[in-house]
């Protein structure tokens, strides 16, 4: 993949762009408290979202957009370097073109990959919360990881995205992404959040599952198979049946697949049939 295919991606992080809706607007989070070591996805929707157009000149009219609203726990908003050396190398391996993404003239992603601390002027980050506590750095990373996954699974030559902070908050963000396949885009966005969460928490053992999810999602988007069982997925992924079943179940959680009721299923010892979740609503 050439550098040109990866441009323009976004993002001017210094000015901390604000979301177009107030922090008190939906999603409803009354009584919810995000744990320090978690990322809570409040909402994932697909639609035109014209309010995102002004955020990035690279957004293409007519291509569906995904809006993911998430809250970052306090552990994801500290002033320490977001990732250690091992996690950065794992991220580079999962997203080999990440360093080539165009961040609208800033060097935030290269600085993060270099292990610099959020708030360091040389890293291109601006901390506006009394010296720490802003989650924009990690939200921005999730956006770019999602872009990389979308480009990989759809085979499209480019993709654009934008990250917005909520006014008066340092934990909540809207991430906008464009994707010709809304189901794949939604799954990619949630997968990106899960990957960044696990890297930040040093959960390296989960990377193999995330990689299988990306690879199977790529296969399903390109082939468009109507339905499959764990044995089918195992062949396509060159892995064991248990690993394949775990991957299929994860794609259900990501919103791309759904379980099909089947009284008789002789082609699989797992007895579970999966298909693309085309019956689901476009939003929600």
Image (cartoon, rainbow, N blue to C red):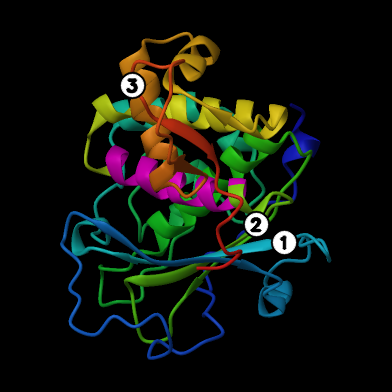
Q: Which residue is denoted by mark 2 in the rendering?
A: 10
Q: Which residues are magenta?
A: 184-199
The part of the image, by quadrant, that contains residue 114 is top left
| Element class at badge 2 | loop
Instruction: Name the residue: 56% across, 27% down.
Output: 96
Residue beneath disc 3: 270
Kindly report which numbered mark, 2 or 1, lies closer to the viewer in this rendering: 1
In the structure shown, which secondary structural element does the residue marked by tag 3 occupy?
Answer: loop
Question: Residue at label 1?
Answer: 64
Question: x%, y% of residue 242?
Answer: 31, 17
* CA distance for labels 1 and 3: 36 Å
Q: In the shown orientation, is residue 240 left or right of residue 284?
A: left
Q: Is residue 69 visible?
A: no
Q: How many marks?
A: 3
Question: What is the secondary structure assignment of the residue under circle 1?
Answer: loop
When the figure is inspected, residue 62 is found, relative to residue 25, above or below; the finding is: above
Residue 280 drawn in magenta: no
The tag earlier along the polypeptide, 2 or 3, is 2
Q: Residue at x 40, y 21 (%)?
A: 244
The answer to which of marks 2 and 1 sits earlier in the sequence is 2
Identity of the residue drawn at 65% across and 57% down:
10
Image coordinates of residue 183 in percent, x first then y, are 60, 50
- Between 26 and 205, the residue placed more toward the observer is 26
Q: Are marks 2 and 3 in contact (CB under 8 Å)?
A: no
């Amino acid at each position: 993949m050439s550098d040109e295919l990866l441009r323009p991606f976004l993002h001017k992080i210094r000015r901390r762009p604000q979301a177009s809706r107030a922090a008190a607007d939906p999603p409803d989070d009354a009584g919810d408290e995000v744990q320090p070591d978690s990322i809570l996805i409040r909402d994932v929707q697909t639609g035109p979202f014209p309010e995102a157009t002004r955020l990035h000149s690279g957004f293409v009219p007519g291509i569906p957009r995904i809006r993911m609203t998430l809250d970052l726990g306090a552990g994801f908003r500290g002033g320490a370097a977001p990732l250690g050396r091992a996690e950065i190398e794992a991220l580079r391996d999962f997203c080999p073109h990440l360093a080539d993404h165009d961040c609208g003239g800033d060097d935030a992603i290269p600085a993060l990959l270099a292990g610099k601390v959020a708030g360091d002027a040389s890293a291109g980050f601006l901390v506006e919360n009394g010296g720490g506590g802003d989650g924009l750095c990690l939200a921005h990373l999730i956006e770019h990881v999602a872009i990389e996954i979308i480009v990989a699974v759809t085979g499209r030559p480019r993709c654009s995205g934008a990250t917005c902070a909520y006014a008066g908050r340092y934990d909540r963000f809207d991430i906008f992404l464009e994707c010709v396949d809304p189901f794949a885009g939604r799954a990619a966005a949630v997968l990106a959040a899960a990957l960044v969460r696990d890297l930040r928490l040093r959960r390296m053992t989960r990377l193999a599952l995330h990689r299988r999810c990306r690879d199977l999602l790529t296969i399903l988007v390109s082939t468009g198979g109507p339905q499959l069982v764990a044995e089918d997925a195992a062949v396509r992924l060159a892995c064991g049946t248990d690993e394949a079943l775990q991957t299929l179940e994860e794609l259900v959680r990501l919103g791309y697949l759904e379980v099909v009721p089947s009284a008789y299923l002789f082609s699989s010892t797992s007895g579970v049939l999966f298909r693309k979740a085309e019956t689901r609503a476009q939003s929600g």
